[in-house]
Image (tube, coloured by chain):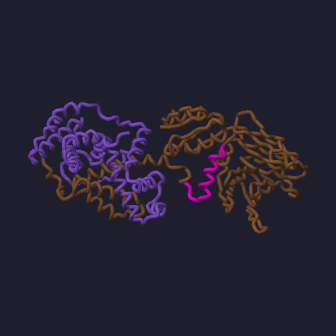
Chain colours: A purple, B brown
Amino acid sequence: MTKTSETGRDGVAISRAGIALPLPDVSAWFVREVLPLEPDLMQFLRHSWRHRSDISDLRQDIYVRLYEAAKTQIPRPVKPVIFAIARNLLIDRFRRERIIPIDGVADLEELEVASDAPLPDRTVLARDELRHLQVALDKLPQRCREAVVLKQVEGLSRDEIAIRMGVSLETVKAHLRDGARQLIDLLHDTSRVST
Amino acid sequence: MTGENVPGLDQESADEIHARAVDWLLAREDADAWSEQDQARLDSWLNESSAHLLAYWRAKSGWRRTDVLAAMRPFRLQNATTTRERWMRWRLSIVAASIIAVVITGAIAAYWNTPRYQTYATAVGGRETLMLGDGSEVELNTDTVVRVPKAAGHRQIILDKGEAYFQIKHDAKNPFVVETGDGRVVDLGTEFVVRQRPYDVQVALIKGSARYEGAASGGMRRSVILAPGDVVLATADSVSLAKKPASDLQIALGWRQGKLIFRHATLADAVAEFNRYNDEKLMLGDTLIGRLEIRGTFRTADVALFAAMTKQALGLQALRRGDEIIITR
């Protein structure tokens, strides 16, 4: 569907010790097997944690913990592991914040069931992907969407986009940056996008 | 297991890291401006923490998913100049003819109330060949109206509407002239195709040589000599010239065999083409699907087949409503 094979291309030089797998393999695993779980993970986090502003930090912590574990051995299947990490992290947070999570506990109990649910279908048909992109694009602020469409659909350079939109190059960069940030979040976290 | 193995997490939120990762990603796509030093700075940023690295992978895989949007690029945007853009659009829209039996409507009618001329017209979906007294041939495409002088020896045709393909017997002493709105094409031994639309005229030269003369102003006409592959686009106040490969011109002339040939055409252009040839009109449910790209060769009357193909190849829906077929997602 997408060029996941390229994701390891940045080939970051590995300076850390004890890595069992070359980094591109971890990268490919992360993109192919972990990121598709993000909608479920985010849904779970939003349901279990009342502070919305913490959600992306929680997600990041979970990914980092999972990644650190994967550097020694890639966990397969990954779904039970990522939800176990999520649960541990939330318990840590609950303790730290001295919260008795009445709703949260129930969710944690249900987690075992959730982790047995079938994996999302990764072989999304191209038309679903396009429709999904369209829905995500529609959620962007209008100027950001315009900039992203001119770049990704029409293939214009940033200078050309500036001319087309009648704004400065700096403004274009800002629109593209904001648009790309939101779009990437929407594409990974499909639970926020209902088609 | 705490967040302690994530350096700087307390100072830098996940959203900030994501934002930074996107900045790197976009900067890196700008290949001209990307230097060795930039790469080194990116590498060192990625090495600072696992959070950076993961955020970058995540941002990159998300952004790559938007690459399929390029598949919806309208074809004209791949071409550099306005002339080329317009020609491409025209090329897509002149690819046509009909297998429907030729219908001449209004032939020999005093439709234009100009008794000096004979009027010939084809219906929507029609195609007709006129054999002129001098041995020249004129093929009329769908929905086309021409006037031919009744008097012998007047080598002239007026294209009032539509599209026609001319194969002209050359006579240097008495050149053949095709009048198109304000401008005209003067034959210098040639085959060419002319399409008249409400706001512009296109002339594509296939063989030989011809002269295009723009609208007269102050008793003068701007003129340009055309060679094979040259395409003129003339509007009320401008004339531009582009060059096309012979193969493209032949695709554009598919109508002479009753075919519509699409190569990298957008769905919107293909629909506009079919609608030139059929009373049963295709409509698009939204503009986005109009940007989908299609390929294929169809008979001009095969509207239903085409609609079925969009269903199969693009996963779209086709609904019949009266004499319209609506294509939607």
Quarter of the image for residue A86 reads top left
> Position of B224 compared to A115: left or right?
right
x, y percentage for residue B72? 49, 46
User: At x 63% / y 40%, what residue is drawn?
Assistant: B275
Q: Quadrant of residue B179?
A: bottom right
Rendered location of residue B113, percent (x, y): 83, 48
Magenta segment, prevailing SS (helix, strand or loop):
helix
Magenta stretch holds residue B91: yes
Q: Position of residue A148 (x, y in %)?
A: 42, 54
Q: Residue at the location (20% across, 45% down)? A: A62
Q: Is residue A83 visible?
A: yes
Q: Tell me which corner region of the image, top left, top right, bottom left or bottom right, holds residue A91.
A: top left
Q: Nearer the viewer, residue B250 or B293?
A: B293
Residue A94 painted magenta: no
Using the image, determine if residue A105 lies above or below residue B223: above
The stretch in magenta equals B78-95
Q: Is residue A122 above or below residue A19?
A: above
Residue closer to the observer: B266 or B321: B321
**Figure label count:** 0
Q: Is residue B117 left or right of residue A161?
A: right
Residue B312 is left or right of residue B182, and the answer is: left
Q: Is residue A64 visible?
A: no
The x and y percentages for residue B98 are: 70, 37
